[in-house]
Image (tube, helix red, strand yellow):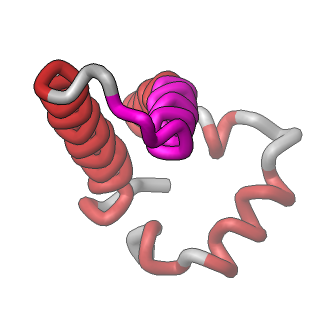
């Protein structure tokens, strides 16, 4: 079982999303410094929610990247018998991920 380059794009996409999130937070921090006394409470609450949600998604994305990069390097999927049905389902739903042997 070998993975092709399409599978390797998953961690790269996660890192790209993380970079976009952090750049948007940086823009928000600059905006809040320029206008610290805003009366718009909805905007403040929505940005607070966005920052907390983004922190969660950032951590989840990093774990996701590590998980797939480790599995890609060690090729654990074929060695685990418990995951055989999951592997068959994954092959059926995402055939482009696997090289045809």
Which residue does the image show at 25% across and 60% down from the upper left? 5
- Point out the image quarter for the C terminus: bottom left
Between 62 and 97, the residue placed more toward the observer is: 62
In the image, what residue occupies the spot 45% across and 68% down? 98
Q: Is residue 34 visible?
A: yes
Name the main secondary structure of what is drawn in magenta. Answer: helix
82 to the left or right of 27: right
Percent coordinates x, y for residue 25 in the rendering: 27, 32
Task: Identify whether 53 is placed above or below 100.
Answer: above
Horizontal and vertical percent position of residue 89: 76, 70
Q: Is 46 one of the magenta-colored residues?
A: yes
Q: Quadrant of residue 52?
A: top right
Q: Residue at x 83, y 40 (%)?
A: 81
Q: Considering only vertical position in the picture, is 95 above or below 55? A: below
Nearest the viewer among 17 and 32 is 32
Residue 71, image x, y percentages: 50, 33
- Residue 63 in sight from this viewpoint: no
Q: Which residue appears at 80% of the width and 45% of the height?
A: 83
Magenta-tinted stretch: 38-56
Nearer to the camera, 49 or 95: 49
Whether 18 is among the magenta residues is no
Q: Is residue 10 left or right of residue 91?
A: left
Give the camera-side residue of 96 and 62: 62
Question: Residue 66 placed where, x, y %?
Answer: 44, 25
């Amino acid at each position: 079982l070998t993975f092709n380059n399409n599978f390797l794009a998953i961690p790269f996409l996660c890192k790209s999303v993380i970079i976009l999130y952090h750049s948007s937070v940086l823009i928000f921090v600059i905006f809040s410094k320029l206008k610290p006394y805003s009366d718009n409470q909805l905007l403040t609450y929505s940005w607070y929610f966005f920052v907390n949600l983004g922190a969660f998604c950032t951590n989840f994305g990093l774990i996701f990247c590590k998980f797939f990069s480790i599995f890609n390097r060690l090729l654990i999927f074929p060695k685990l018998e418990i995951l055989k049905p999951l592997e068959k389902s994954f092959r059926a739903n995402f055939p482009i991920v696997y090289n045809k042997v």
